[in-house]
Amino acid sequence: MRHAFVTATGLTAPRLPQLPEMRAGLRAMLMALLLPLVIAGCTMPRGAALQSEVLRGTDAPDSEVQVVEVTRDTLSEIALWPAANAEPRQRWITTGAAPSARIIRAGDLVSLSVWDSQPDSLLTTEAQRSVDMSRIPVSASGKVFIPYVGELRISGLTAEQARREIQSLMAPIVPDGQVQLSVVPGARNTIDVVTGVARPGRVELPEISPTILSVLAESGGISTALRNPLVRLNRAGQAYAIPARKLFSDPAHDIQLRGGDRILVEEDRRSYIALGATGREQVVFFEREEITALDALSSMGGLNDSRADLQGVLILRDYPESLVRETGPAPRKAQVVFTFDLTSANGLFAARRFHIQPDDVVLATESPVPLFLQAVRLFRGVEHSVN
């Protein structure tokens, strides 16, 4: 009802509303303006998106993103998908170490001593019963030149095999002669330890070829500063790799080395990105060979208790177009979002078995509950200001 009062002039004028009525009107107006914005999530300061915002539009037929809910039922099929970023982490020679003598290779230096006690020997004299032929180089074709014998191929033989072969060929000249042979390894009969150890350098092969663990030990061992080190072996144009922990744990992996082998020990460069309502937002490196979704959340500092949505943990992964398939165990689209519900035993066990791959993005979305509580506090603040 419109209120009126009589002025000094006797005219009747509308009466102004009282203070309680002004408060109620102002409060209603502010609520009407703020409520739609709060519901839309536009006014609340936050560090991550809501799950509904991230997945908005992914159910459309023309969406370029595939959404996969990870449960114990779907995990068995996901495990058959090809790796998005395939990196050979274990391609190794599986034969165990077996003692074997070093073989002669091109570039080695061979020294011979021929002993003959016959007085009419063609090689020796009465005063000197032996003749020495020192540091005879093994040619690129694997041959050496020996007087009275000619060129002889000895590459691929052990020192003992070469000695017997030379002594047999010299028998017509010195029937009672005895041959001694020694080999100084050349560049092709050495092992290069390039990086990742305390003392990198070139290691000469002893008479019996060493194993890879013994060479690593001789080089001072793997640097303790390396994160989850990977041991690489380059041999005859082939590359092999094995995690150091697996090399140490299985004696069958301690293979015997050959001349020309190269060993490199590298730090694990694989990483994933942590974002959202977590303890930290940054690039996180793999600390061990396999990281599960729960491991990743733990490495990220866990979920923020006051912000994170336990039903909205997402893992974003890019697959090459060449791996996309319409049927079979493969992604249907190049961009895949894996969703986890950590409020159920099903989701927790699935997250425990789901493996993170390099370059994944682990996103903990915001929970709408803190936003609602923040809105309530905002409304109370507005009401207090109006009062």
Image (cartoon, rainbow, N blue to C red):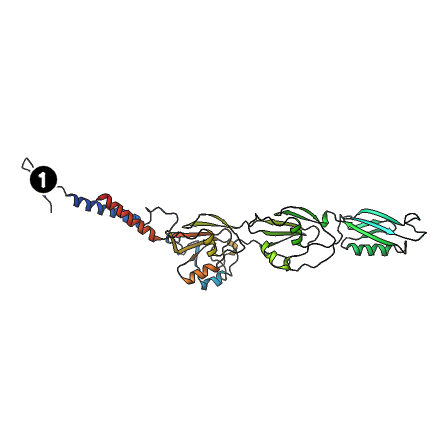
Quick one: 302 or 31, which is closer to the camera? 302
List the single residue furthest toward the top: 9
Q: Residue drawn 25% across and 45% down?
A: 382
The reply to whether residue 237 is in sight is no
Q: Residue drawn 29% across and 48% down?
A: 377
Position in image of residue 147 (x %, y %): 87, 49
Looking at the image, residue 254 sits to the left or right of residue 382; the answer is: right
The reply to whether residue 75 is in sight is yes
Looking at the image, residue 187 sits to the left or right of residue 38; the answer is: right
Quick one: 70 or 61, which is closer to the camera? 70
Quick one: 51 or 193, which is closer to the camera? 193
Secondary element type, mark 1: strand
Task: Give the residue type that dot 1 points to.
Answer: Ala
Position in image of residue 37 (x %, y %): 30, 48
Q: How crowded is mark 1: few (under 14 residues within 10 Å), some or many (20 or more)?
A: few
Q: Residue drawn 34% across and 53% down?
A: 368
Position in image of residue 148 (x %, y %): 88, 50
List the single residue furthest toward the left: 10
List the single residue furthest toward the right: 120
Quick one: 314 or 179, which is closer to the camera? 179
Res 20 quadrant in image: top left
How many numbered discs?
1
Looking at the image, residue 73 sits to the left or right of residue 188; the answer is: left
Quadrant of the image containing the C terminus: top left
The residue beneath circle 1 is 13
Position in image of residue 372 (x %, y %): 31, 51
